[in-house]
Image (cartoon, coloured by chain):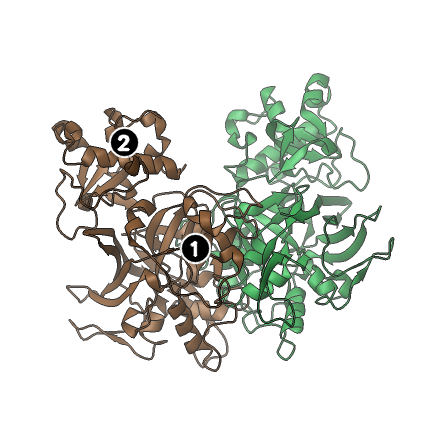
Chain colours: A brown, B green
Amino acid sequence: MKLQQSPSESGLKGAIPAGAKSWVPVQAGSDFPIQNLPFGLACIDHVEEAVVVAIGDQVLDLTALAAEGLLPEEDFPILHCFIDVDKNDLRVLRMLVYDLLREDNSTLRDNMALRKAAFHPISEVEMMVPVEIPSFVDFYAGIYHAGNVGKMFRPDMDPLLPNYRHLPVGYNGRASTVIPSGAPISRPKGQYRPKGVENPVFGPTQELDFELELGFFISDGNEMGEAISVARAEEHILGLVLVNDWSARDIQRWEYQPLGPFLGKSFATSISPWIVTMEALEPFRIEGPKQQPEPLEHLLAAGPAHYDINLEVALRTPSMRQPQVIARSNAKHLYWSIAQMVAHQTSNGTAIEPGDLVATGTISGPDPGSFGSLLELSWNGSKPLRMQETGEERTYLQDGDTLTMRGWCEGHGIRIGFGSLETMIGAVS
Amino acid sequence: MKLQQSPSESGLKGAIPAGAKSWVPVQAGSDFPIQNLPFGLACIDHVEEAVVVAIGDQVLDLTALAAEGLLPEEDFPILHCFIDVDKNDLRVLRMLVYDLLREDNSTLRDNMALRKAAFHPISEVEMMVPVEIPSFVDFYAGIYHAGNVGKMFRPDMDPLLPNYRHLPVGYNGRASTVIPSGAPISRPKGQYRPKGVENPVFGPTQELDFELELGFFISDGNEMGEAISVARAEEHILGLVLVNDWSARDIQRWEYQPLGPFLGKSFATSISPWIVTMEALEPFRIEGPKQQPEPLEHLLAAGPAHYDINLEVALRTPSMRQPQVIARSNAKHLYWSIAQMVAHQTSNGTAIEPGDLVATGTISGPDPGSFGSLLELSWNGSKPLRMQETGEERTYLQDGDTLTMRGWCEGHGIRIGFGSLETMIGAVS
């Protein structure tokens, strides 16, 4: 590979020093300092799809840099799209971009014509789903969420089912309806049985809910029949995004026995636009909760495998000027690590593929203010949320409501953010 | 479109007269008379992937016909592969092939050099999964199967759950592990809890089972947010294949609550190689079972929407010379029609895509000899099957066993068959 710049050895591993600075201005509190450099796919000027990197309040169009010879296009077919996602390519590419953006590198800084062509205000580009997603799998690794659901729906039993602490429960979702931040969703229709009624009806869901999750993209897959070990699982993970696993609770409740969620979930899943790389998240790696009983060997992990990622959900009704934060949680509340999810999913020889999206399940914390769904926040509709600005109440989402999720790591003198995942609820489709 | 032949008007609709004959010899009882002409994707001479049609005991390589100008290649990009599946294209193409194969057409018949290049014995080509499959969805529409499972696992309740007669229950499966007939499967490992033991173990499944199903391929999809009506659903269906939905019962039993089957199914799904078109199946359209209560309007169908397709499962252990038929069933035992499955799946606005594979769920009949899984045939392991030739017993499948599924329609003086779906159980992966 012909590197036009020479990243240092630590750089090749993807670590950007906490003290590094860019000649691109980055506001205090920005999600996108030079230590982050997440990847996305942007539609620029309503025509061109380009692989871009975020820095400060700008996106940097990598295809424009390649056209001018600043990035070796022949080495990075991913410059055109993310269809062939290669983790190593992307790691090296990110470090080349880092070098171009360092405050002491004048190559791009002093090329005003190229800067004009390559940089765009983040507010002016339309971000897309970054990769073609062959499959979407959703886990259930948020133990407080699983416990809350158990308390509500099986009040006489142990809230956690017997399998919960032995394996990461998960299911196959629908990849064809994954949409980007900014794309509105339509209230889905479906069959459900209103409370106290014997026969079901068909119509718009009356219980439209969100689920606060993280998701990760698979870079390299495995051959069918070959398992991926916990120890090697993260080598197959490109990076993380925020995921809103939209749920129609009434449809889900009626359909889900015995084969699990289907149409109550498949109508839409929203993801944030920026793939925050594992390298950028590395400083925020932490120990997860103690797993008791100890997992069986194929799920046994050594060392910290969780991430300290703050998560926040805000709601704005059509009458409100400002969104109100309705939940604050953290990825540390996941019982199972993302490495364990990969190991579990492939433990039976299932082939996973580049671009596969895997989500964690709803990440609730232990306190009511940290619950990651309206099902939990309103305790199955029994405790409506009050909007302070207008006095309105919400159990489930209404048409015109806008839901925003945010995620960020903070510490070591840096902040690594995910940007926002914002979705408006449209009318019935 | 430049048709080099001129199919009659009825021909353009895809109906091939029951009395039609081909100059290609077709043995009595063949699955592939000229009235069938199913499509497949073949690997010929271990190198070339070609779209082929089956007739008698031969496959006809359509790319070879196109190279000689007998099929208008420019009109049929699908000649190279099935990635862009268009139902209308395929319907017209099938009628062009029909015309070339009619006994009174000498064009191909008298071109011995081209016949030599284009025909191959069916036994000498390797058939592949015919299309790239974006998603695999599996329904649960076999009412006798659902009832049997209910009787075994919920003996104190109504065997059918309350939702069963109101909607076709289904779930998202795993598309990346769909494999063709002839490909062996490895016994998957997984986590399960042996009977009478508190803690689960991880190891090769002890309860490897098959499920006898039919599947269909989606031709044209829908836009996200747009439902497909029952009346128009079949316009989106290309044709049918046999499906073996491999199941590891011990893994499935331990993992499936509350989110449904995952690793107990995702390790492999086998399909038969020939897409039997809806046009070929049309003469075998029948009324389905009376649906009581009457479905809600979005699932309400007028007229016969089921198909009279005989189904058969045979098992051969390594010690047996001949396979033994262990189950005989029929697609008429499905409670929900395939049109209702499409309408249901899209009723919430889910986007379905060309190449999507949708399976019916296990098709058991009312009698023990018609059960479509070993779970049912051995009644949860309590009644082992006896192999007449060797006296061996089977509850679940053993390494070295070969399972074969067949399907065919018979009547109106014709037989439309699916060929066979044959799979050997290999050792642990």
Left of B305 or right of it: where is A390? Answer: left
Q: Residues within 10 Å of mark 1 (few under 14, many from 20)?
A: few
Q: Amino acid at mark 2?
A: Thr
Q: Nearer the viewer, residue B13 or A381?
A: A381
Host chain of mark 1:
A
Is label 1 on the same chain as label 2?
yes
Quadrant in the picture for residue B363: bottom right
Q: Nearer the viewer, residue A180 or A197?
A: A180
Q: Secondary structure at mark 1?
A: loop
**Is A42 situated above or below A165?**
above
**Is A255 situated above or below A36?**
below
**Is A410 situated above or below B237?**
below
Whole-Å distance between the Cαs marked 1 and 2? 40 Å
Q: Amino acid at mark 1?
A: Ala
Of tags 1 and 2, the one toward the viewer is 1
Q: Are marks 1 and 2 in contact (CB under 8 Å)?
A: no
**Is A49 situated above or below A422?**
above
Q: Secondary structure at mark 2?
A: helix
Left of B271 or right of it: where is A399? Answer: left
Q: Which residue is mark 1?
A: A302
Q: Nearer the viewer, residue B405 or A224?
A: A224
**Which disc is residue A63 wearing?**
2
Left of B109 or right of it: where is A155? Answer: left
Host chain of mark 2:
A
Q: Residues within 10 Å of mark 2 (few under 14, many from 20)?
A: many
How far across and how far down the image is residue B414, in percent?
A: 76, 44
